Image: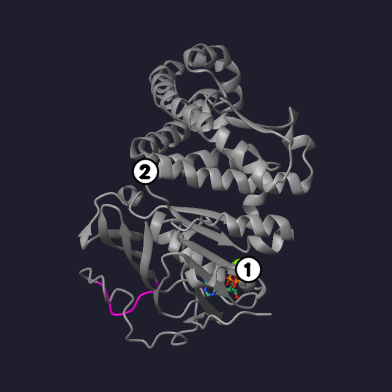
Amino acid sequence: MYLRKLKGMGVRNLLPLELEFNPKINLFLGDNGAGKSNLLEAIYFLATSRSFRTNQDQEMIQSTAPGRYYSDKVPVAADHQPANLPDYQPGIYLSGEVSAVDGDSKIEILYQPPRKEAKINGKPLSRLIDLIGHLRVVLFSVEDMAVIKGGPHLRRRFMDISISQTDPVYLNDLQRYIRILKQRNRLLGEIRDRIEQEDLLDTFDESLVKTGNALINKRRSMVSEINPLVKGIYQEIGGSQKEVQLEYKPGVEEDDFLNRLRAKRREEIRRGVSLVGPHRDEIAFTLDGMNARAFASEGEARTIAICLRLAGLEYIYQQSGEYPLLLLDDVFSELDEHRKQYLINSLQADVQTFITTADEHVLKDLPLANSSVFRVEKGEVVSGDRKVAK
Ligand SMILES: Nc1ncnc2c1ncn2[C@@H]1O[C@H](COP(=O)(O)OP(=O)(O)OP(=O)(O)O)[C@@H](O)[C@H]1O
Ligand SMILES: [Mg+2]
């Protein structure tokens, strides 16, 4: 699938924008702080109703001195036309035209805290979560380079994002699991403080196990599917004979879940936190049999991180029958020449790719026939020419 057009206003430092993208490669060039990552964030927000940089959505809303980018009369909600909105309120409005195998669609999202609403082809969605899947994206940023050596939540997030985009049932289960976990943790604390009775835990345990097992199941099969992909890509990109292996390490095995909850109950009450379940899952990476988290070099760990992302892209293709968008935020500056070349060569003709960089030289390596160059300057995005930096 690909994003044909993007309209937006109110996103961080970006001026109101109206852009038409190349179905293949889109390169965003500009100085540090110009607004390149903000543009990718806008696309990600349109796809997921979330930011990839913050949990605090409000941070994304443009903070401006009044009248700096908008005249007082520019309504954020101009296209959206929800009832009862004054002409101007701080907020974000994005609309995108998407081409996919099953046809074209228009996605709109309006965020004016506390309301956040989305429409598909003009029809409001009753649940925001139903937005997922209409525009699929795989994001790779400098922070994602840490996925191998950083905390296990990064690896869980990778699984969640990859599976959710092609499996609405998983996304539902995931949200439910998080909700149950929160409630259960609160209850554990209340039992410890003798505000609530211990037997209330039984029903929570059952739903935790039921929902948790659904997650474990899907994650297990996802990891087993991407394992050979990562291994193959690593051998090509790493130019090395070393072998990468991934192994899913669930926090608990499905048929043992309830027993372990029983066994840990006293400790859980004492600590006021749930100690058993897929929120403790891990993916173990090995490089030639050695634990990559502990033993891989920085360069090797980054290379595995790239391979993981590309495998995630392939996974979504296998699951959904079409490639998602690939958003590469500033990753080229972190790679040596060989890996940069491989990454560029592996940009597949049928993957719409968005690349940000402050380094003009990336231009010279791109297949220019298939790419559009945009200049980003102080929040303004303009279609540029395709001149090559020598
Ligand atoms: N809510 C906001 N309102 C207005 N401006 C914001 C907001 N949040 C961030 N900014 C500004 O946006 C700019 C950063 O934009 P962005 O992160 O997209 O830069 P970039 O082009 O990706 O730069 P780099 O090359 O350093 O990665 C900063 O100048 C920052 O002050
Ligand atoms: Mg940036």
Location of mark 2 (residue): 320
Residue at image position (50%, 27%) is 220
379, 203: nearer the viewer:
379
Instruction: Say which residue label 1 marks.
Output: 365
Secondary element under disc 1, as helix, strand or loop, is: helix
In the image, is 180 to the left or to the right of 102? right
The three-letter amino acid code for the residue at tag 1 is Asp
Vertical arrangement, residue 174 with respect to residue 263, above or below: below
Q: Residue at x 55, y 65 (%)?
A: 355
In the figure, residue 287 lies in which quadrant?
A: top right
Query: How far from the left and from the top, in percent, is residue 297?
Result: 79, 43
Residue 384 x/y as whole percent: 51, 82
Query: Residue 171 location, x and y as percent?
Result: 39, 39
Please state, as top left, top right, bottom left or bottom right, where the N terminus lies in the image: bottom left
Residue at 32% x, 62% y is: 98
In this orientation, does residue 59 appear?
no
Q: Amino acid at mark 2?
A: Ser
